[in-house]
Amino acid sequence: MDPKFQGAGIATKLLNFAEQFGKENNYSAIRLDSFTENKGACRLYEKRGYEKRGFVTYRKGDFICFEKKL
């Protein structure tokens, strides 16, 4: 992400939208993954109630799988 946009709350707004959309459309959960070295994203997801469900390895490296029940 371009540094001039960091800390502007964009990720939080996107999560708010996704969670609201999921609730309105009867989704049971939201699942996502984050690069293990992206500490900011990992903290944000945990702060928002997403739980670690496992790990997956892609070409770039290891990713944490997160899930939040809606």
Image (cartoon, helix red, strand yellow):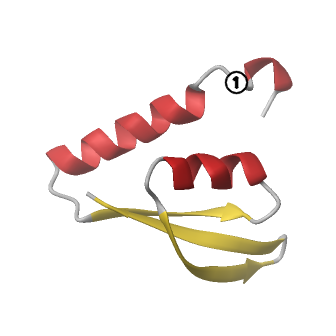
Residue in view at x 64 percent, y 51 percent: 43
Please indicate whether residue 41 sits to the left or right of residue 15 in the image. Answer: right
Reading the image, the residue beneath label 1 is 7
Characterize the local packing of mark 1: few (<14), some (14-19) or many (20 or more) Cα atoms within 10 angstroms.
few
Q: Image height check: is 63 above or below 34?
A: below
Q: Is residue 12 above or below residue 7?
A: below
Q: Name which quarter of the figure residue 1 lies in.
A: top right
What x and y, as percent, mark residue 19? 33, 45
Q: Which element carries disc 1, helix, strand or loop?
A: loop
59 up-or-down from 21: above or below? below
Going by the numbered disc 1, the residue's amino acid type is Gly
Q: How many marks?
A: 1
Screen quadrant of the C terminus: bottom left
Query: Compared to 38, does 4 lie above or below?
Result: above
Q: Position of residue 33 (x, y in %)?
A: 59, 65
Residue 4 drawn at (x, y percent): 81, 17
Toward which corner of the image does residue 63 lie, by quadrant?
A: bottom right
Nearest the eye: 20 or 69 = 69
In the displayed structure, does residue 46 sit left or right of residue 55? left
- Residue at 20% across, 48% down: 23
